[in-house]
Image: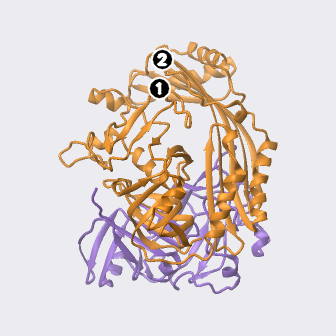
Chain colours: A orange, B purple
């Protein structure tokens, strides 16, 4: 579906709402156009363009809620979907945690989430961008597998209490893995932006090519505790487990690393190194996001960890009401402060340590300590006296981001990166961490 | 083959290992079957997303790698005349591609209950249920944990344990399989969210097993203080 204007969205939402006979009705109308190329074994494997939209109608009678979704926008189809949501609501049991929909809200001015050049990317442009990546692979006698995807979206909502919100956004994400022909070396690079002009697939593939060639002939060293430098693409997958777990209800109910045995929580307590500052800011120029959430709540600039102290929890609307506090939605953008040092400077300042390109298959081991396991992948190197000495075999780790941020040694300059686990973007510095816990070796390349 | 090298990864079970006809994946007790027809399983279908009829076939026979999982494009690579019906797309708007069928460890042929199995263990841990699971990008190294852990001493359960996880190399682990309980203990587990592909797609799939005994597996204590 084309990216509809604010007026077009308002007209369809108004029409849909006019059919409502429920106590309350809220309607979300979203759509996107996206395109992708996937490649492997140095050739394109799949590609396509996807255009989609949906109108999600939520009707409530008291605490009974019914939801229907349609993508047919003629009057009769919309009315039918509204009626169906009302029928479902009448059949549904009461939800004791139902919270009435929000009234009109004031949102911050929209940040630059939509870049017309990204929305206008053609199949030909995608082909050229991937061709540049494949050329690096072929020139270096490496085998490439990668993925390039761009999308443009509109999001809008309206409810029977007078709330209306609208936003548009674009993004383009790229990742590539290069492997040596003998299967003994592998390198990775990933980047994502709102603005396609910032995405240089050639330059990012060159980084992956260097890592692939450099990781050939990896040596095994003993598992144990090592100083590590986590590149942003490695650090994000552990950090997102921390900032994604700041839920007040889990902490209050004793299910979280933020719970205390006496039933209280660690809100306001210093839990990590005082150099750690993590916040969200929808208007950040390098990571712009929507100024409102899908339930119509405003997204504001908010500190989550300040000088190592837990400053805020997220509160669902139900839990906020129960606790008599203000609702705090989960953030869409995360920024972690860093320093000015480049990755190269962090390496130079390392006496002995391990450079980690990527961590993968991250899984929770113990929610009470926020312990996670996973493995290094696609470029793991031993550092001695400020220089990369040799590639090493991959490790499995068992580590908590809380312990990791207590063992913080140095922070580099933050950069925008993409999580290989959640596919979310964040601004994360490269981090040098002491005593990172590796528990076994992996034979995987 | 390398189609998933950028995300889900590749496999150590390369074609040369299958071609040798004697790749020792596990002990003689290990029989692993692919079955897209198994009643009650999450991955049971009549036909796959290329219209190929669902089948059942051996993957590991008496510990040896004997077969793979193919779609129509891939069947010829291992000398098959037709696909094994492993093509799947999560919805109409996704590209169908090769996905894992139900994969299950077959029960032992001799009568053996979990209670009898425990009687034969001098020192060990009885693990029930699954919790954390993580594998490397070539399926060599894994770490898993369970829901409940019981300590076994001299053939008896003597108490419960906390903070247990086990790590191993896949081939070493399956070669340490000393016994598998019989059909009466066999049950299906499964996941609705087996992930693969870019854009990522989810597939629902089951894994069947009876209680099994593995010797000399590396167990770690996961207790940490924050």
Q: Where residue A313 appears, x then y in whole percent? A: 34, 37
Numbered label attached to residue A89: 1
Q: How many marks?
A: 2
Of the pair B113 and B9, the residue shown nearer to us:
B9
Residue to which mark 2 is pinned? A22
Residue A378 lies in quadrant: bottom right
Q: Which quadrant, please, contains the N terminus of chain A? A: top right
- In this view, A269 is above or below B146: above
Chain at numbered mark 1: A
**Residue at screen point 53% across, 67% down:** A387
- In this view, A381 is above or below A271: below
Residue B48 appears anywhere in the view: no
Q: Where residue A61 appears, x then y in whole percent? A: 43, 20
SS at circle 1: helix
User: Farthest right residue?
Assistant: A124
- In this view, A194 is above or below B161: above
Chain at numbered mark 2: A
Numbered label attached to residue A271: none
SS at circle 2: loop
Q: Where residue B226 appears, x then y in whole percent? A: 28, 56
Residue B23 lies in quadrant: bottom right
Circle nearer the N terminus (2, 1): 2
**Residue at screen point 52% across, 59% down:** A360
Q: Is residue A19 left or right of residue A205?
A: left
Q: Is residue B214 left or right of residue B137?
A: left
- In this view, A288 is above or below B13: above
Residue B78 appears anywhere in the view: yes
State whether discs 2 and 1 lie on one chain: yes
Q: Which quadrant, please, contains the C terminus of chain A? A: bottom right
Q: CA distance from mark 2 to mark 1?
A: 9 Å
């Amino acid at each position: 579906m084309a990216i509809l204007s604010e007026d077009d969205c308002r007209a369809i939402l108004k029409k849909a709402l006019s059919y409502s006979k429920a106590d309350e009705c809220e309607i979300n109308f979203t759509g996107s156009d996206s395109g992708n190329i996937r490649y492997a074994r140095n050739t394109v494997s799949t590609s396509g363009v996807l255009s989609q939209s949906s109108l999600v109608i939520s009707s409530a009678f008291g605490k009974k809620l019914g939801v229907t979704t349609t993508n047919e926008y003629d009057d009769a189809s919309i009315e039918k979907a509204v009626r169906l949501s009302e029928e479902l609501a009448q059949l549904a049991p009461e939800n004791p945690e139902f919270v009435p929909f929000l009234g009109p809200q004031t949102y911050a001015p929209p940040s630059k989430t939509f870049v017309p050049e990204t929305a206008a990317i053609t199949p030909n442009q995608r082909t050229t961008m991937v061709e540049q990546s494949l050329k690096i692979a072929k020139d270096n006698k490496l085998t490439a597998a990668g993925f390039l995807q761009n999308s443009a979206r509109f999001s809008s909502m309206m409810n029977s209490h007078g709330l209306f919100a609208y936003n548009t956004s674009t993004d383009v994400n790229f990742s590539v893995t290069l492997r040596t022909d003998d299967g003994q070396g592998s390198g990775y690079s990933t980047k994502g932006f709102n603005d396609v002009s910032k995405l240089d697939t050639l330059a990012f593939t060159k980084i992956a090519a260097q890592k692939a060639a450099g990781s050939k002939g990896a040596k095994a060293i003993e598992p144990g505790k090592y100083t590590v430098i986590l590149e942003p693409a490695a650090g994000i997958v552990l950090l997102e487990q921390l900032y994604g777990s700041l839920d007040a209800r889990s902490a209050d109910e004793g299910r979280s690393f933020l719970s205390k045995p006496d039933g209280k929580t660690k809100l306001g307590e210093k839990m990590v190194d005082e150099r750690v500052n993590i916040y969200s800011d929808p208007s950040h120029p390098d990571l712009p996001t929507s100024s409102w959430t899908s339930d119509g709540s405003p997204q504001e600039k908010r500190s989550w960890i300040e000088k190592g102290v837990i400053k805020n929890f997220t509160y669902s609307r139900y839990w906020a009401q129960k606790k008599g506090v203000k609702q705090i939605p989960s953030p869409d953008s995360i920024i972690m402060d860093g320093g000015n040092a480049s990755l190269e400077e962090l390496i130079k300042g390392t006496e002995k340590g391990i450079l980690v390109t990527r961590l993968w298959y991250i899984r929770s081991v113990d929610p009470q300590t926020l312990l996670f396991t996973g493995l290094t992948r696609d470029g793991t190197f031993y550092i001695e006296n400020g220089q990369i000495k040799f590639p090493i075999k991959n490790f499995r780790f068992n580590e908590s981001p809380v312990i990791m941020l207590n063992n913080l040694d140095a922070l580099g300059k933050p950069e925008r990166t993409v999580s290989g686990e959640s596919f979310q973007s964040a601004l994360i510095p490269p981090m040098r961490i002491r005593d990172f816990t590796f528990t076994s070796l992996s034979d995987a390349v | 083959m390398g189609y998933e090298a950028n995300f889900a990864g590749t496999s150590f079970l390369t074609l040369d290992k299958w071609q040798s006809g004697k790749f020792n994946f596990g002990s003689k007790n290990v029989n692993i079957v692919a079955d897209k027809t198994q009643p009650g399983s999450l991955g049971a279908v009549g036909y796959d997303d290329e219209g190929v009829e669902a089948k059942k076939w051996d993957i590991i026979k008496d510990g040896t790698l004997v077969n793979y999982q193919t779609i129509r494009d891939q069947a010829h690579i291992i000398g098959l005349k037709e696909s094994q019906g492993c093509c799947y797309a999560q919805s109409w708007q996704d590209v169908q591609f090769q996905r894992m069928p139900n994969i299950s460890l077959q029960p032992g042929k001799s009568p053996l209950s979990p209670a009898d199995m425990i009687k034969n263990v001098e020192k060990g841990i009885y693990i029930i249920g699954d919790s954390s699971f993580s594998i490397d990008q070539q399926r060599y190294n894994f770490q898993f944990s369970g829901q409940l852990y019981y300590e076994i001493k001299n053939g008896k359960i003597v108490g419960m344990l906390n903070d247990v996880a086990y790590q191993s190399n896949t081939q070493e682990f399956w070669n340490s399989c000393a016994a598998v309980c019989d059909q009466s203990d066999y049950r299906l587990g499964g996941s609705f969210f087996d992930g693969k592909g870019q854009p990522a797609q989810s597939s629902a799939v089951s894994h069947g097993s009876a209680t099994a005994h593995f010797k000399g597996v590396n167990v770690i204590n996961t207790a940490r203080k924050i």
